[in-house]
Image (cartoon, rainbow, N blue to C red):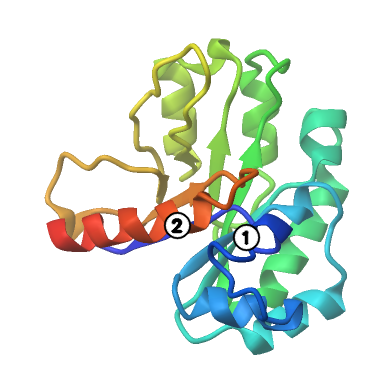
Amino acid sequence: MDVRIGTSGWTYKHWRGTFYPQGLRIADQLDHYTERFRTVELNGSHYRWPADSTVEAWRERLPAGFEMAVKASRYLTHYRKLNEPQDWVERIVHTLDLLGDHAGPLLLQLPAHLHRDDDRLAGFLGLLPERVRVAVEVQHESWLDEDVFDLLDRHGAGFVVSVIAGREPVLRATGRLAYVRFPNADPAGAPPAYVSFYNDNHGHAALNAPTLRRMAEAEA
């Protein structure tokens, strides 16, 4: 079973002195991170899509076996709400292709105000080529339905197990991968799992992630 544990983003000032040594150069933070984890969630892409030159530089710098999950732009998910997605699909696929072997899954975070719309979600997922792995995070409770889980399965999309205030997390695994997975089957045949700790104000994410990794390795 391939378990990858990391954090959402890696460039935070408040990580100095907790995860990053005080004297570490900002330019060296990614190297420090990749020596300790096998995946990272690119959170900045949600706010500003990275330039090709930046992605190519990451590709050349990341070590063998390291994967970068890419969070979909808010302009696609929160502003357009998946409407007229073709140009964003092309941009996403291009960026993932630039990452090459370091391309992790696409994280599609749907906004809390977006109610269930199976046709809209299926229309977007249907535009992605098979080589693109995608994990879908829903925040409105209307999406928590067996038909939606079946839809994700049909498209090979993973359901993101997320903790939302006031609601118990739904522990489901769909498609070809999972974010935060609690397997109940033989791990030898299980799909890969990705876990990202949310960024915070005190640098806890970068400390909690290796703790969970050690726990997972002890159980393996």
Q: Which quarter of the rendered picture does the N terminus lie within?
A: bottom left
Q: Is residue 118 left or right of residue 84?
A: left
Above/below status of 31 relative to 164? below
> Residue flagged by tag 2: what amino acid is it?
Leu
Q: Nearer the viewer, residue 92 or 56?
A: 56
Which residue is the site of mark 1? 15
> Residue flagged by tag 1: what amino acid is it?
Trp
Mark closest to the chain's N terminus, 2 or 1? 1
Quadrant of residue 119 within the rendered picture: top right
**Gap between marks 2 and 1 measured at Cα:** 9 Å
Q: Is residue 101 visible?
A: no
Which residue is the site of mark 2? 207
Q: Is residue 104 visible?
A: yes
Helix, strand or loop at mark 1: helix
Where is residue 40? Give x, y as percent: 56, 62
Which residue corresponds to the image point at 32% horizontal and 53% vertical from the top-left? 212
Helix, strand or loop at mark 2: helix
Which residue corresponds to the image point at 50% horizontal and 41% vertical from the top-left? 155
Where is residue 50? Give x, y as percent: 83, 64
